[in-house]
Image (cartoon, rainbow, N blue to C red):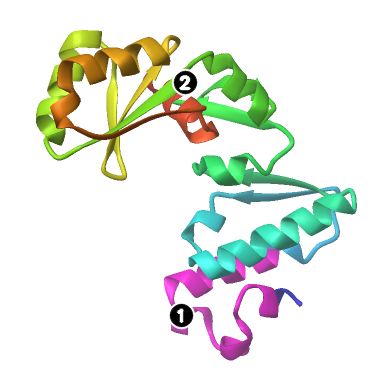
Amino acid sequence: MFIQLLGLADVRGRRVGELSQGQVTAAEIAKSLIPVVDVYAIDGLIERLDPAVRKRVWEYILSRKRHGETFIVGTSFGREASMCDRIAVLVRGSVVFLGTPNDLVAEMNSEVVAVESMNTPILKSQISDRFGSVVVERNGMLEIRSSDASAEAAEILSRSASDVSCLYLRCPTLDDALEELERR
């Protein structure tokens, strides 16, 4: 079953030295899932799988979770962590948060102003200087976290409207909260 789940059917019977790094990682995960135990631990291995296999592994974990099995998964992806009931966030070797993903996002107490511009470096500098905020560049957008996002959005538009192609407000994600914890 795990051989199919992890995409190892074609390499069954081959020596580990003949496998690609991704196949070795998949074999390690399969090995950790075979024994019947109270708690399964997969520390960071899932991140090294190709996306299709990683998706199947998460589907398996979530289906087993519905049957009462417990998994401890190490991941740096907020989307994957959001599928967990509880998370522990480690920063420089210390636990800085323990609770639910929703609790962590709620702790942020802010919104995100997302701005797209043809003059990204100039606008980024202007926003940083004006608001003293950390401006993050992600997917071609500038993002500013703020407890008063509406006021900051209005200020950006009033000062730099000609440089702004698109501006919107959004709720913070778990990835935003994790990045915030890392910066502290």
Tell me which segment is drawn in magenta: 3-31
Observer-nearest of 62 and 118 = 118
Q: Picture coordinates of residue 86 (x, y %)?
A: 71, 32
Q: Work out how far the residue at label 1 is from the one at label 2, CA to CA, in angstroms.
A: 49 Å
Q: Amino acid at mark 2?
A: Glu
Density class for disc 2 (Cα within 10 Å; few <14, some 14-19, many ≥20) is many
Report whether 126 appears left or right of 29.
Answer: left
**Mark linked to residue 17:** 1
Element on which disc 2 rests: strand
Report whether 75 appears left or right of 99.
Answer: left
Q: Amino acid at mark 1?
A: Gly
Observer-nearest of 42 and 134 = 134
**Mark linked to residue 111:** 2
Observer-nearest of 74 and 52 = 52
Give the vertical position of 143 relative to 62 (above or below): above
Q: Main secondary structure of the magenta part?
A: helix
Give the vertical position of 92 relative to 73 (above or below): above
